[in-house]
Amino acid sequence: MVSDLSTTTLPKLIQGGMGIAISSWKLARAVASRGQLGVVSGTAIDRVIACRLQEGDQDGSIRQAAESFPDQGLAARVLQRWFKPEGLDRPGAYKPVPLFSISPPKSLLELATFASFCEVWLAKHKASGPVGINLLEKIQAPTLPILYGALLAGVDTVLMGAGIPRDIPGLMDQLCQHEPCDLRLTVENGEDVAIPFDPSIVEADLPTLERPKFLAIISSHVLAMSLARSGGVDGFVVEGPIAGGHNAGPRGWKVESGEDPTYGPKDEVNLDRIKALGLPFWLAGGKDASSSIAEAEELGAQGIQVGTAFAFCSESGMEPTLRRRAIAYALAEDLETRTEGRGSPTGYPFKTLNLNGTEGGRDASERERQACNHGYLRTAYQKPDGTIGWRCAAEPEADYARKGGDPADCAGRRCLCNGLLATAGFPHAMKSGGIEYPLVTSGIMRDLPRFLSGKSDYSADDVLDELGIEKSAKPELPIRLTHEVQNGPAYRA
Ligand SMILES: Cc1cc2nc3c(=O)[nH]c(=O)nc-3n(C[C@H](O)[C@H](O)[C@H](O)COP(=O)(O)O)c2cc1C
């Protein structure tokens, strides 16, 4: 059931999904309130919500969203397990959340479903425009419960990059019908295996949900063409190499080279080929000038996706002191973004900011490696006995080697899970003492002074104004109501 997308109802601007928790519900709500597509990050949202609850859910938002969760028994179990009204005993002392695997404990599936429901519900609550959720294809094990929670909250669009999300549209159809389904997990050196998910963990009498739009984030017209052929894709975000976060590698580049990638004309996406597919597309990567929307339209695009400009605004989920410090350094022109070839355990190039006191300000080897405690970027591998194991090139080399990994893979790798959680204000305690350093990813920050226009801080509204989004803009995608509203009870004020 793919809904018809007429270009007259599409937003000009997509606020890029930024993990972990940088595109928080507050940011997505601010953008959606101006009628554009606000996007929350679904990456590690289970841990983010578990951390916020352990910090006492200080603004009460999670408990507010929980009241609208369709299975109140499940919501109560999650709160019982994670909510600590008195907050943390000491900085970084979060209770460990189990790691996702092929058969994760039911309590983790409940947490993930509940968490994405809350984040999307909060972004949509009181906002007049559409809300999307961003997920990375590379992170497979938590995908189905996170998608399902977002669907239950009435998410309008699902956006997915960092991989080839060919199976996702079909899985969305199944989840909308509350059908059990399987996600295909890539296994290094072995056969792919299925990760099952049964939506009946949410015990409620639910109507069939309307299938949200699905936008694939791509950096090559070849991939766009292949995904369009597979079907179920409603449009594309075409991301260029200067975009923040992960990037596709340039042609011919190999992560094993140890070199940071450089991009050339051969890496340019052929927009005519994308246009010929007849699906709407948005351009991403350095598209934050007041002329960017018009320029994108000239090229046949529907509009733009913007990340970095929103990552440092006041509604961003970035830890506030860190965010202010990054702005100050950017104004002093004392910051550089590096596209690290080996930094991310995903194998994709990853942008890091060389801000003092963060991981990007020091060499990857300076962090003492810890046993993998979050596990989102682990890859599945087949053990000699045929069972599935998990390893990450950022865990201690000895652990990686014991699991059959090549220790050479470990060189230069950073622990993105811990670094990005710390950037969102959830630094975890380290075994060796102290807490994890943040790791800031960003695109080009040269335009921040324009959004500040002489002030010391700026908001999402300042960015939207600068990009020429009308203040009176009406929501351009239809807002769908959650099952609760359809069934009677309205959103609580
Ligand atoms: C802090 C940050 C985190 C990001 N995280 C993600 C992510 O989790 N998933 C994703 O698809 N893109 C991610 N991106 C890319 C953005 O969604 C967007 O496409 C990109 O930032 C656009 O380019 P710009 O940064 O030049 O505006 C991230 C970007 C930034 C700046």
Image (cartoon, rainbow, N blue to C red):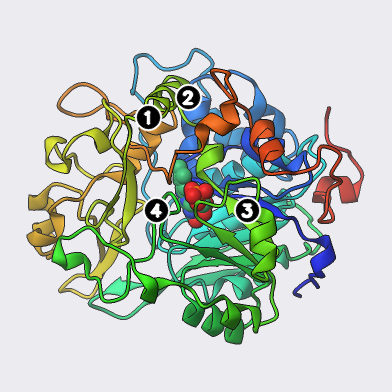
Circles 4, 2 touching at the beta carbon (< 8 Å): no
Earlier residue among tags 4 and 1: 1
Task: Bin the neighbour count of mark 2 within 10 Å (Cα to Cα): few under 14, some 14-19, many 20 and up.
Answer: many
Disc 3 residue type (three-letter): Ser
Earlier residue among tags 2 and 1: 2
Secondary structure at badge 3 equals: helix
Determine the residue located farthest toward the bottom in the rendered image. Answer: 229
Disc 4 residue type (three-letter): Phe
Earlier residue among tags 3 and 4: 4
Query: Mark 3 or mark 1, which is nearer to you?
Result: 3
Circles 2, 1 touching at the beta carbon (< 8 Å): yes
**Residue 114: where, in percent of width, then height?**
60, 43
> Gap between marks 3 and 1, in whole Å?
44 Å
Task: Bin the neighbour count of mark 3 within 10 Å (Cα to Cα): few under 14, some 14-19, many 20 and up.
Answer: some
Secondary structure at badge 1 equals: loop
Q: Which residue is located at x 47 percent, y 31 percent?
A: 318
Mark 3 — residue? 292
> Gap between marks 4 and 2, in whole Å?
20 Å
Q: Place residue 187 in its image quadrant.
A: bottom left
Residue 100 image label? 4
Query: Mark 3 or mark 4, which is nearer to you?
Result: 3
Earlier residue among tags 3 and 2: 2
> Gap between marks 2 and 1, in whole Å?
8 Å
